[in-house]
Image: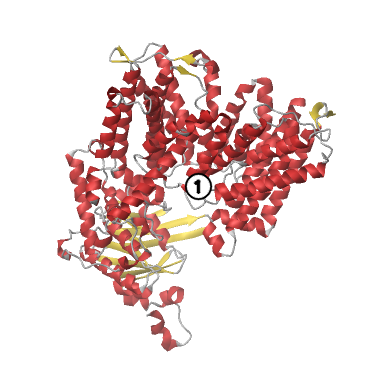
Amino acid sequence: MTVLWAGLALGALYATVAMLFNIGMAQAGVFNFAIPQVLMVGAFVGYEFAGASLAILPVVFVVAAGAGAILGLLIELVAVRPAARGGHGILITTVGAAFVIEGAAFIKYGVGGHNVTLFGWDRLFDLLGGRLFVVDAVIAVVAVVSIAGVYVLSRRTRWGLEGRAATLDPESAALRGVNVTANRLQAFMLAGALAAVVGVLAAVKINASYGLGTSLLVYSFVAFAVGGIGSYPGCLVGGVVVGLLQAYTARYIGAEYALMIAFLLLLIVLLARPTGLLGNRQLRIV
Amino acid sequence: MTSLIARFGWVTPVVLWLLTLFAPGWGFTLISQRDIIMIGIYCLVAAGINLSFGYGGELALGQVAVMAAGAYTSLILGSHGHTDVLVQIAASALVGAVLGLVTGLPGLRLSKWSLGLTSFFLIMLLPGVVVALRDETGGLEGSLVTPVTAFGEPVLVDDLYVLVLVVVGLWFVIFRNLIMSGYGTALRSFRANPMLVESLGVSARSMRLSSYVIGAVPAAVAGVLYAQLAGYLSPTPFSLALLLSVLAASVFGGSASIYGPVIGSIVLVVGPTQIEAFEEYSVLVYGVFLLVVGGLFRHGVAGYVRILMARITGRDAVTPGDDKLTPPQRKATEMPDLQGGSLRAVGVSKRFGGLQALDGAALSADPGQVTALIGSNGAGKTTLLNAISGFVKPDAGSVQIDGTDLTGRSAARIARAGVSRAFQTPVIPEGMSVVEVVASGALRRGGLVSPASLLRLPSFRRKRRADDAAARGLLDLAGLSHIADKEASSIPLGLRRLVEVLRAATGSPRVVMLDEPAAGLADDALADLANLLELVKSHGATVVLIEHNVSFVMSVADTVYAMDAGRLIAHGEPEAVRNDPQVINSYLGRSTAEPEQEGALQ
């Protein structure tokens, strides 16, 4: 049971990162390589607060969200906007932005990982015959709530509709009065804010280190692609599948094979269903 | 000037290559031999990216994984006593080709982004594979590489330098000759739109897979050379970071260029990859470098050089006055006969889900005639054209040209059988001159890749000169000689339509099919188009066109077919079809005031 909980907790984290990727993809048609690095910055916000008297939940989350939104804004302005005019330059510039953030964190905090204790969430408790950390349960709740929230935002609001229109065809969307650039900017800020908040939780669960974002990148991407690029429920499904797969592989086969097996799963799923498990046929990202 | 550059553009790279080859002997040591070897290795991998990504537009980024496969192939062969470098290179190239094919197969089904990202992360699998095969690979700790031999002699550092230069030189000869031949034209057309390359008689699937395979081979060979340079092999160097720096080298030098990777590789190897000097700032500085390259330097060095050269030689974009046609130098009688064929499509049906798009539609067209197809939107006109040209497989019916049955063949095969096609939205590839675009119609006659084109044999040169002359002749007769050497993707809509018609008329097509060539054209451009159609028709071409501009149809067509709801409702002389009550009801419309009816049609 403990393995199951560990897998689900991991899966919830991957699911949220996949959701962050999906905000960029569904709302602006951009794969934002730098978003896990914003999450890492959020982790260091948590680290800075740990032990301080101001470390009350709303303050930490608001500060993290604010920092994340600003970073999202900067990424859009510096990495996406200049390269958005065509070609695949965005692939390079968002990676560049990721390196800049990672490099800055490396300069400030060095190589090692810093344990972060906040709100007493690093305690263990028993649930249905297995043990898990409080923070794992929090991450699971945050994952479900935030993915549901962004899904509603994407499907039920004008903002979501405009973004999806801009993803399919930026020119026609602009001709119909959609401010494509502003919509993309808002999407990046939203993703940034969410990423940094999740980062605080990730700091408690794993630790705060400059490599945190990169370590989440690959599994989260697999979760994202398996679930279906463009689909928010897909992020949740993909995250859980990949998290469980990793936990059980590590437990019964060996940790070094986890990535290989995840990739095998990705290839099988993509060959059988190129749009992923829950991928939306209408929203083909071309 | 332009032709001089095209003819002798190869001289500069060859001279630079020779200088690099002999530099160490002359005591030139500005860049160490080791760095130059590394630059060569980068060049090979980056050039592979240029072929599949820069020219083909396919985001297949498995090159570093392929490079690792090449390196480990070399390691394993060496440890089993197969130290001959030629054997190792051949074996690694084979492994690379197979791996390029296998990793590319998902690309047949995936959209660009999923393919790009999946292949991007492929390299993460390497450590797992290396550990699983640790008896052969030495696992994560790595393994010593057995030095290679050439013709039985050991290869020392100086020899490795020569070897790398020879391999890089050979690859660039192959790469350049491929790009500057039918294959390169097909690759650029494929990038513009897979349907375009199909209409030129080349299967899009074969373009896709061949670009993965050809792009992977140099990466695998680079792996062999890298193993020799390092002397010691572990999975560590084959990282996402390496993939990124090679990708950055490709983009920095110019992805859609032949020699760009050389410039990009020099900059990357001498610059950012050595910024360990900055120590803790290295990652940050590298990130800034990527931001600048991707954001502000999109065309790459080669791209900007090309823009500059185009300005100097006048090959740049058209200017406002250019849409006036120039009087032809040649007489129309000098144009060779176009030898159209007779098209017979009978009983063609096609159902999409619940929609019967075509319901026993028929069309006949004969040489020396313009056959027009009219009907309201959704009547099935474009679907009928697609069914004839193989983009849609008809459920029933038959399509014949001069008695040869083409029903159910692939679009590329039908194009090779002589059905040419222009699309509703003009598709003009980037980075090609107008004359090259027109000449690309000759791809329909085959000759995509041949030993003659790779070796630049006289037969290839003759064919290329003939294609070029034929295209220039056509352009002259169409009044477009003044834009023959301009960048084709920059020309305005009216000229674009004319160029598309010329491309469709090139390569001895039996039937030329045009989908709404007059859409969106102003009166002047309409008249130019009508003249061109008249010219093509008078030289014996079989022209089929879909058109909504009724007065234009009445003026150019010899026979008109009217369609409604997937069926043929009338055909015959233009006047007869125009006055057919069914056509008036379903398409032309009847005004409430009877006397105005005639006016509404003109």
- The percent coordinates of residue A3 (x first, y second) are 74, 26
Task: Pick the residue in front: B86 or B248.
Answer: B248
Task: Pick the residue in front: B83 or A210.
Answer: A210
- The percent coordinates of residue B401 (x first, y second) are 28, 55
Tally the marks.
1
Q: Which amino acid does label 1 sit on?
A: Gly
Q: Residue at x 52, y 51 (%)?
A: A84
Residue at image mark 1: B295
Task: Pick the residue in front: A215 or A48.
Answer: A48
Quadrant of the frame with the C terminus of chain B: bottom left
- The percent coordinates of residue B53 (x first, y second) are 43, 41
- The percent coordinates of residue B441 (x first, y second) are 29, 52
Task: Pick the residue in front: B35 or A244.
Answer: B35
Left or right: where A104 falls relative to B247: right
Q: In this rendering, does residue A217 appear at all?
A: yes
Q: Quadrant of residue B27?
A: top left
Instruction: Identify the chain of the residue marked 1, using the numbered disc in the image.
Output: B
